Amino acid sequence: MDFTFDDQQIEFRDAIRKFLMVEAAPESLREIWETRSGRSNDLRAKLADQGLTAISVPEAHTGMGLGDLDWVLAQQELGYYAIPDSLSDTAYLAVDLLKQLPAGNALAASFLPRIASGQARIAIAHPLNPLTADAENAELLLLWHDDEVHALRPGQAKLVPNQSLDMSRRLSRVDWTPSATSRVCGADAGRGIWADVVNRAGVALAAQLVGLASRMLDLGIDHSANRKQFGKPVGSFQAVKHHLADVAVKIEFARPVVYRAAYAMQKSDPQRAVHVSHARLAAGEAARLAARRSLQVHGAMGYTWEADLQMFMKRAWALEASWGDRGFHKTRVAAHVLGEGAALGPSQTF
C-alpha cells in the first residue's frame, strides 16, 4: 500500500505552519506562560479561526468532521511551536471522548459546538497522568474511575496546583468523589472509550515530540552556524555535523512510525495500541537525542531562560512522561512482539 497525505491535508498543515510562525513566536509564548493562567484567550480565538479547534468535531456540531490523519500533521506543528496541550486535550481527546458517549448524552450536544468555536476548555484526568493538565483553566473535567466516565465542573472537585518543569503546563492533582450524579458512562462502554483516549493521546504526543525534535534540531543548526570557535562556525566542524545528522536520522525514522499509528487509529486497527506505543517510543527517542545534541551545540547557555532551546527541551521532557512513560509503552510493544503469531516485518506494515 502506498500511503501519502492528500493535497488538502498538506495545504492545511502548511496554513497552520504559516499562522504559528507569526502568532507563536517564542517571545510571545514566554509572555503568556508568565501569566497566572498560562493561557491566552486571544491566541485560542485565532487558533479557532484557523479551524484547529474544529478538526474532529462532527459537521452536525459545526465542526469539520476530519480524523486522526488530519490531526497528526497539525500536532507536529503544535509541537514545533510548543503550543500548550490544552488545545490538544480539548479539541482532540475530549472531542473523541464526547463523540463516543451513549446516544443522547447532553454533554456532547452542549460542548461540541463550543469546542469547535474555541469557547470551551476541557481537562481530562486518567490514572496514567496523576497530575491533570489545565484543570484550573477548564470549565469541564472528564475523569476516569474504574473505567467509568465521570464529568464534573472544576468547582465540584478540589484542585491542588503542582509546578511543572515545563512553564507552559498548568498541572493540578484532582481530588474528587465519584457518584451516580457525576457518572455519564458506565464501565462496559467506558472501557473502550478510555482505551481510545489513551491511544489518541499517544498519537498526539508522539507527533508533538517529532515536532519538538525538529525544532530543537533547527535551533542547534542555527546556533552552530552563528557560534564561532577558532575563527570558524562550530557547525563547520565534522564532529558537530555528525551529532546533528544523527538527530535528523532519528526524526526521519520516527515520523513514518507516527503516521502509521495515526492511520491505525483512524482505521480502528485491532493492533492500534502497539502501533501507538511504537510511535511514542520512536518519537521520544528522537526528542531526547535532539535535546541532548542541541544542548551540546549551545553549551551551558542552552539552559538559560533567554535561550529558546530550554523551552522546547523542557516541554519534550515533560511530554514524554505523559499518558504512559517509556516502561508502559515498552511493555505494550513487548507483549505484542513476544506473543504467539505476531505478524512482524515490513510486509505487515499495512
Image (tube, grey):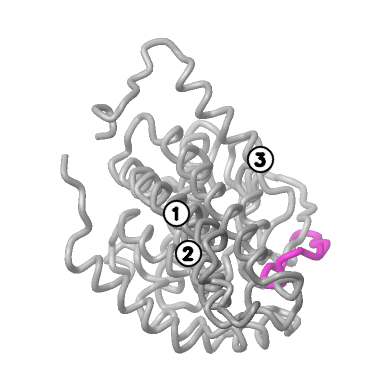
The residue to which callout 3 is attached is 145
Amino acid carrying mark 2 in the image: Ser
Query: Disc 1 versus disc 2: distance between alpha carbons?
Result: 7 Å
The residue to which callout 1 is attached is 251
Asked if residue 168 is among those painted magenta in the image, a careful observer would answer yes
For residue 325, side relative to residue 65 (left or right): right
- The residue positioned 42% from the left and 45% from the top of the image is 102
Is the residue marked by circle 1 packed among few (<14), some (14-19), or many (20+) residues within 10 Å? Answer: many
What numbered label is drawn on residue 214? Answer: 2
Judge by depth and name the residue closer to the eye, 312 or 137. Answer: 312
For residue 263, side relative to residue 300 (left or right): left
Residue 308 horizontal/vertical position (percent): 63, 78
Which stretch did the figure color magenta?
156-170
Residue 197 horizontal/vertical position (percent): 50, 46
Number of labels in the image equals: 3
Judge by depth and name the residue closer to the eye, 325 or 171. Answer: 325
For residue 257, side relative to residue 143 (left or right): left
N-terminal-most mark, 1 or 3: 3
Amino acid carrying mark 3 in the image: His
Residue 93 appears in the picture as rendered = no
Query: Disc 1 versus disc 3: distance between alpha carbons?
Result: 37 Å
Residue 178 appears in the picture as rendered = yes
